[in-house]
Amino acid sequence: MAATGTYCDTNDLRLVYNAYTDLMGTAGTDYGAFIVAASDWLEASFYAHDMTPPPVSPMDGSYDYWLRRACACMAVYMAADSILSERTDSVDGAWWARYNDEAEGILSDVHSGVKKLSYQTTAWQDSISPAVPWANGTTAAPPVNMLHTSGRIGARYEDNIPRQFEIELDGSTGTDMSNFTFKYRVIGTSAYMGQGQPCDVTGWTTLGWNVQLLWTPTPRGSAAVGQRWRIYCTPRGEEVVKAGCKFGQRNWA
């Protein structure tokens, strides 16, 4: 897992540039400083488009693949440019420029919606995200495809302010999914609602604002009391029109 405040780690650097330790060793520098700088760049890019950097995925303890890839590419570019640019007469066509191009391209695709992150909705989900597995203390994140949201069938979130739901299995009388019960709350409030509510595997359970849940037996792994999910709901999703442009496009007028 990446260090706190960073979006990639040395394993991601190795996938982008296998000899990164040799590159860093050339100037005796600390690669961690470039990871931090690249993470700052990535986060600034998100905030520049009124987007919130996503949380760590509890499934593998790291950020989404495309974020890690973009951060690692930018870290390699920053390191190479810092070390090598002074040794050349011109950086035009420099071999390390391609890492900057790839990083910028990934972020452009995220901004425009070409690439979706785990917490973002797709076009047919509109503004209700999938249920994202979430770690809960010592309880590992649940396996995927156990809980589905109404975003999957095209439901629209019915409010004008964003909300995040947290769902937690809070009891069980057996091992089948239908034997479990759950509770839920809106993140930011301490009180859970619907405690002891059955996990319905035959129909949709309504939470509010047109957000509904459907439970299904998971093909891999198993259900356990204490497992959690989060659901992100935004009035218009991430792909809003601003200043006549969509995210990833610039208006210089």
Image (cartoon, rainbow, N blue to C red):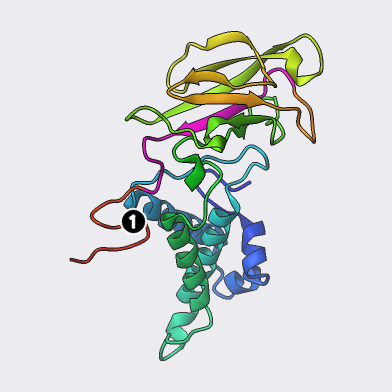
- Disc 1 residue type? Lys
Q: Is residue 136 visible?
A: no
Secondary structure mostly seen in magenta is loop
Above or below, 61 relative to 218: below
Q: Which residue is mark 1?
A: 246
Image quarter (top left, top right, bottom left or bottom right) of the C terminus: bottom left
Q: What stretch of residues is rendered in magenta?
A: 224-239
- Quarter of the view holding residue 76: bottom right
Residue 233 is one of the magenta-drawn residues: yes
Q: Position of residue 191 (x, y in %)?
A: 48, 11
Q: Is residue 95 visible?
A: yes
- Circle 1 packing at 10 Å, graded few (<14), some (14-19), many (20+), is some
- Quarter of the view holding residue 23: bottom right
Q: Position of residue 167 (x, y in %)?
A: 58, 22
Query: Which residue lies at the image location 42% right of the left edge and 31% below the top edge?
Result: 157
Q: For numbered disc 1, what is the local secondary structure?
A: loop
- How many numbered markers are drawn? 1
